[in-house]
Image: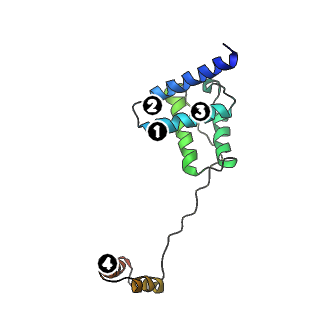
């Protein structure tokens, strides 16, 4: 057996052991965590996670935000997967990861219609939908 085949076999066995530890959770969480851990290992040239630590985790998570431009929830999911890996599979504690470049959360602006816009929407409705819209608007609007 070639060295690269042995390495691939070891890599697959390791990911299977991670998957086995996740069996008590949901199938989607298991798939997601194993996928994130797989990407982490591949990012570091198939080094075994036991040989790595906080600096490598920080580098990986920061690259997701900077080069990968992933959403903050994706980066948080990757962090959770790696914390699970180190705590529950490798039985190692990672120090707090202060140097991680965090993905930016988008600014969410509430959508508020002006009174004229609400009147225009109500004018386009007919029958029961009109009544429901008027009641809903009257109940939700603050007194002027």
Image quadrant in which you'd find residue 25: top left
Q: Do the residues labelled 3 and 2 touch (CB within 8 Å)?
A: no
In primary-sequence order, the first of circles 1 and 2 is: 2
Q: Residue 95 carries which label?
A: none
The Cα atoms of the two marked residues, 2 and 4, are separated by: 48 Å
Q: Can residue 10 be seen in this view?
A: yes
The Cα atoms of the two marked residues, 4 and 3, are separated by: 51 Å
Q: Is residue 1 positioned above or below 142 on the image?
A: above
Q: Which mark is residue 22?
A: 2
| Foreground of the two, 45 or 12 | 12
**Label 2's element?**
loop
Residue at the image position 61 percent from the left and 40 percent from the top: 97
Q: Position of residue 11 (x, y in %)?
A: 60, 24
Q: Dot 1, how many residues are within 10 Å of its Cα: few (below 14), some (14-19), or many (20+)?
A: some
The residue furthest top is 1
Image quadrant holding the C terminus, namely: bottom left
Q: Which residue carries the number 1 mark?
A: 29
| Foreground of the two, 119 or 91 | 119
Mark 2 or mark 4, which is nearer to you? 4
In primary-sequence order, the first of circles 4 and 1 is: 1
Q: Are marks 2 and 4 in contact (CB under 8 Å)?
A: no
The Cα atoms of the two marked residues, 1 and 3, are separated by: 14 Å
Q: Which residue carries the number 3 mark?
A: 38
Q: Is residue 144 visible?
A: no
Q: Where is residue 81 in the image (x, y as percent from the top left)?
A: 53, 37
In primary-sequence order, the first of circles 1 and 3 is: 1
Q: Dot 4, how many residues are within 10 Å of its Cα: few (below 14), some (14-19), or many (20+)?
A: few
The Cα atoms of the two marked residues, 4 and 1, are separated by: 41 Å
Q: Is residue 15 left or right of residue 54?
A: left
Residue at the image position 54 percent from the left and 68 percent from the top: 109
Q: Which residue carries the number 4 mark?
A: 132
């Amino acid at each position: 057996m070639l060295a690269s085949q042995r390495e691939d076999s070891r890599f697959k066995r390791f990911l299977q052991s991670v998957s086995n530890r996740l069996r008590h959770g949901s199938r989607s969480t298991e798939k997601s965590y194993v996928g994130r851990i797989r990407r982490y290992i591949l990012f570091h040239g198939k080094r075994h996670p036991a040989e790595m630590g906080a600096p490598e985790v920080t580098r990986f998570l920061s690259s997701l935000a900077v080069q990968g431009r992933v959403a903050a929830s994706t980066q948080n999911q990757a962090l959770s997967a790696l914390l699970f890996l180190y705590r529950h599979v490798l039985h190692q504690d990672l120090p707090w990861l202060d140097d991680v470049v965090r993905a930016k959360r988008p600014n969410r602006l509430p959508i508020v219609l002006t009174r004229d816009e609400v009147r225009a929407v109500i004018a386009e409705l007919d029958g029961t939908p009109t009544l429901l819209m008027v009641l809903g608007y009257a109940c939700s609007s603050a007194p002027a």
